[in-house]
Amino acid sequence: MELQQKLRINYSECEKDINDAIIAFADISSSLYDEPGKFIIDPTSNGPQFDFDIPGKKSTGKTKMQIFCFDMMLMKIWATETNRPRILVHDSIIFDGVDERQIAKALLVGAKMAELHGFQYIVTMNSDDMPDMSAYPDFNLDNYRVDLDITDTETGGLFGFRF
């Protein structure tokens, strides 16, 4: 049996899992944008090829939000697995070039998904980059924020270490 045929058989055996991933990606992306994004998985002779598309103008921000949606999709799919990561960490670079409204929505989605699927969601972000969350009066960012005070003095540092 040739490799291409084996990959197609394996693809069809995993069809339910693939469809679950595609639907989860669409659901998560639709919570950030008006139209759901697409997660496309094609079997190729070199293995599966992944492609993403969030409708609208191609921009760095939307590309970063595709990564956000993919990561959240994985956490949702893994929720039922026994040996899975129970933590997702995003550095603030994930939001570089992203509209403030989408950042606010992403933080809200991240918090809801973490609670719903039993994982810890950590975002490292400077306080001056925090979005305006007033559109979500039921979401209190202070319930999730951990303030770090890093100083450049002889007694300062981070977690007792000087860099």
Image: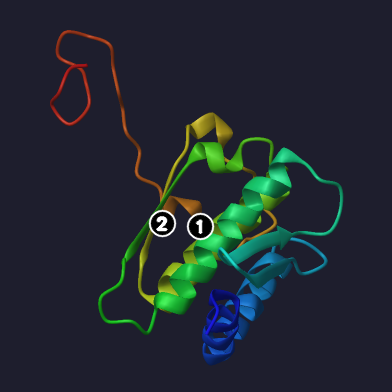
Nearer the observer, 32 or 156:
32
Task: Say left or right for 87 vs 159.
Answer: right
In this rendering, the answer to whether 62 lies above or below 45 is: above
Disc 1 residue type (three-letter): Asn
Q: Residues within 10 Å of mark 2 (few under 14, many from 20)?
A: few
Image point 65% across, 45% down: which residue? 132
Q: Secondary structure at mark 1?
A: loop
Task: Say left or right for 67 vs 74.
Answer: right
User: For residue 43, what is the image quadrant?
Assistant: bottom right
Q: Where the C terminus falls, by quadrant?
A: top left
> What residue did someone put label 1 on?
140
Residue 151 x %, y %:
28, 17
In this rendering, the answer to whether 12 lies above or below 26 is: below
Q: CA distance from mark 2 to mark 1?
A: 6 Å
User: For residue 137, what is the image quadrant?
Assistant: bottom right
Residue 92 x %, y %:
51, 38
Image point 58% across, 53% down: which residue? 67
Nearer the observer, 50 or 8:
8
Q: Is residue 55 visible?
A: yes
Q: Secondary structure at mark 2?
A: helix
The mark found on residue 143 in the picture is 2
CB under 8 Å between callouts 2 and 1? yes
Image point 64% across, 57% down: which residue? 105
